[in-house]
Amino acid sequence: MIEQFLTWGDLVTYGGAVMAVLIITEFTKDLPGIRCIPTRLWAYLVSLVLLVAAVVFTADKVRAEDILLCFINGVIVAMAAVGSYHAVQEQME
């Protein structure tokens, strides 16, 4: 039996981050106030927040270079999440 669905340790992995961003973006993109933000930008903002939070909660010491890498990795995670969504949508059509 699974004791935890998702951990901060999962979010510092590529697969865990992509999965979380995909789910959170899809669940929240139609909320008022967020609806007007392009989905790719929203996915990037979600990935940035998750990656920075994961670094803060899992690292012994948060370094500036770790936060800077979150900005770069956020682009990669957001692109993978949005691309995965579109690939599944195309298969369903």
Image (spheres, rainbow, N blue to C red):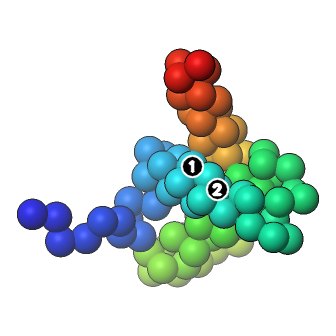
Q: Position of residue 28 (x, y in %)?
A: 66, 63
Q: Position of residue 29 (x, y in %)?
A: 72, 58
Q: Amino acid at mark 2?
A: Thr
Q: Position of residue 17 (x, y in %)?
A: 51, 53
Residue furthest to the left in view is 1
Q: Quadrant of the C terminus?
A: top right
**Res. 5 image quadrant:** bottom left
Q: Determine whether 50 is above or below 93 in the image.
A: below
**Res. 31 image quadrant:** bottom right
Residue found at x 64% / y 30%? 86
Q: Determine whether 63 is above or below 29 in the image.
A: below
Q: Is residue 72 visible?
A: no
In terms of depth relative to the viewer, which is nearer, 66 or 27?
27
Q: Are marks 1 and 2 in contact (CB under 8 Å)?
A: yes
Residue found at x 83% / y 60%? 35
Residue found at x 90% / y 59%? 36
Residue furthest to the right in view is 36
Between marks 1 and 2, how big is the CA–CA gap? 5 Å
Q: Is residue 65 left or right of residue 33?
A: left
**Res. 69 image quadrant:** bottom right
Q: Amino acid at mark 1?
A: Leu
Q: Secondary structure at mark 1?
A: helix
On residue 25, the disc is 2
Q: Determine whether 1 is above or below 90 in the image.
A: below
In terms of depth relative to the viewer, which is nearer, 39 or 31?
31
Q: Is residue 33 visible?
A: yes
Look at mark 1 in the image and give the residue it sits on: 22
Q: Secondary structure at mark 2?
A: helix
